[in-house]
């Protein structure tokens, strides 16, 4: 950690909200290579031998520990691919903080594709936080394509909080889930695009076990000429509950497309999808402008509150 320069430290803080990981396990990856690692008595991190990536192994019953696994790209022309597998022991309860930051000051693209697979044993609980961010003065694209695969056994709970802060030119975000009895998968996604950026989100969740449930909330803002697509497919195969909520604000010439699909293969499956897309209401702007804010300031306040 102490070997990182100021640019790296600043980028790391933007995607993890911290510059001190000493309280738990961590693995820092930069430009396709591991640069720092720490394990604990209950959490082991092992480099894969057959492909790029790591295995994160959490002992049964581990409580209230943290794991940081950020990725940074600070060189133009890097095309990074990583496979991270998480093995969470029975009744464990931990927080995992991931995310990727790209700093690109040149004309070549910089790209990171991360495939994260979660295996949660019975009763395990995970809070998974990921932030994606791009910056730099170069013309090279900043591309992030995260894929999350979730396999939850009986009574397991995974809460996923995913945020794309800004600066990402193109992203395809795919989430796949399979839930057993009494398992729960809760997702909060927030995305902002501007310029000519593009973002695509795909959710495919199968509710296979009795009383399994998923709750997905996606909030997004598309500014300028940016485009976003949101696809969700919730499959209820037994007595279960699924709720997907997609809300988006479009500004300028922004475009948002939402395609819901729900499939009930059981008469006891309860599946709901809600979608709302529109511009900022004029009365909201007027109310804030009467308080002395300019139109631009009022718009920013509404957007920030919407994505909070």
Image (spheres, grey):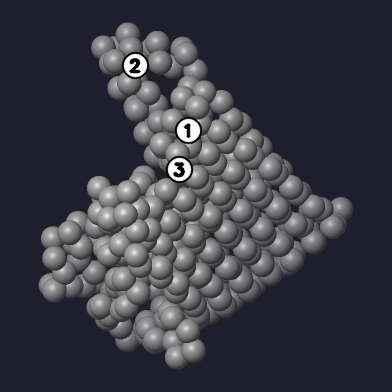
Q: CA distance from mark 2 to mark 3?
A: 24 Å
Q: Quadrant of residue 303?
A: top left
Q: CA distance from mark 2 to mark 1?
A: 20 Å
> Is tag 2's residue or tag 3's residue first in the polypeptide sequence?
3
Instruction: Return the disc, 3 or 1, that comes first in the chain's sequence.
Output: 3
Q: Tell whether label 3 touches label 2 (CB within 8 Å).
A: no
Which image quadrant: the C terminus? top left
In the drawing, does residue 155 fall left or right of residue 4? right
- The mark nearer the N terminus, 2 or 1, is 1
Circle 3: element type:
loop
SS state under label 2: helix
User: Can residue 101 be seen at all in this image of the molecule?
Assistant: no
Q: Please tell me whether residue 5 is drawn above or below residue 46 in the rendered image.
A: above
Dividing the picture into quarters, in which one does residue 196 lie?
top left
The secondary structure type at the circle numbered 1 is loop
The label shown at residue 225 is 1
Residue 295 is marked as: 2
* Residue at 49%, 61% in the rendered image: 146
Badge 2 density bin: few <14, some 14–19, many ≥20, Cα 10 Å: few
Q: Is residue 159 left or right of residue 295?
A: right
């Amino acid at each position: 950690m102490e070997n990182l320069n100021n640019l790296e430290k600043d980028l790391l803080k933007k995607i993890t909200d911290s510059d001190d990981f000493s309280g738990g396990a961590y693995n820092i990856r930069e430009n396709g290579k591991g640069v720092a690692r720490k394990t604990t008595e209950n959490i082991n991190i092992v480099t894969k031998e057959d492909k790029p990536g790591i295995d994160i192994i959490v002992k049964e019953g581990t409580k209230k520990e943290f794991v940081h696994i950020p990725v940074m790209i600070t060189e133009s022309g890097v095309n990074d691919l990583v496979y991270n597998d998480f093995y969470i022991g029975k009744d464990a309860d931990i927080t995992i903080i991931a995310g990727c930051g790209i700093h690109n000051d040149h004309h070549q693209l910089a790209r990171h594709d991360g495939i994260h697979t979660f295996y949660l044993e019975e009763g395990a609980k995970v809070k998974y936080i990921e932030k994606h961010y791009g910056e730099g003065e170069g013309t090279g694209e900043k591309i992030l394509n995260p894929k999350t695969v979730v396999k939850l056994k009986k009574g397991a709970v995974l809460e996923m909080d995913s945020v794309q802060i800004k600066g990402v030119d193109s992203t395809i975000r795919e989430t796949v889930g399979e839930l057993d009895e009494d398992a729960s998968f809760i997702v909060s996604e927030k995305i902002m695009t501007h310029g000519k950026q593009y973002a695509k989100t795909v959710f495919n969740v199968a509710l296979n076990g009795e009383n399994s449930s998923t709750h997905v909330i996606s909030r997004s803002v598309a500014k300028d000429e940016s485009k976003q697509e949101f696809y969700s497919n919730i499959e209820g195969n037994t007595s279960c509950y699924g709720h997907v909520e997609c809300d988006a604000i479009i500004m300028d010439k922004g475009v948002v497309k939402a395609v819901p699909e729900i499939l009930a293969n059981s008469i006891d499956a309860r599946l709901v999808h809600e979608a709302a897309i529109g511009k900022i209401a004029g009365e909201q702007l007027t109310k804030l402008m009467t308080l002395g804010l300019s139109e631009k300031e009022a718009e920013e306040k509404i957007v920030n509150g919407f994505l909070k």
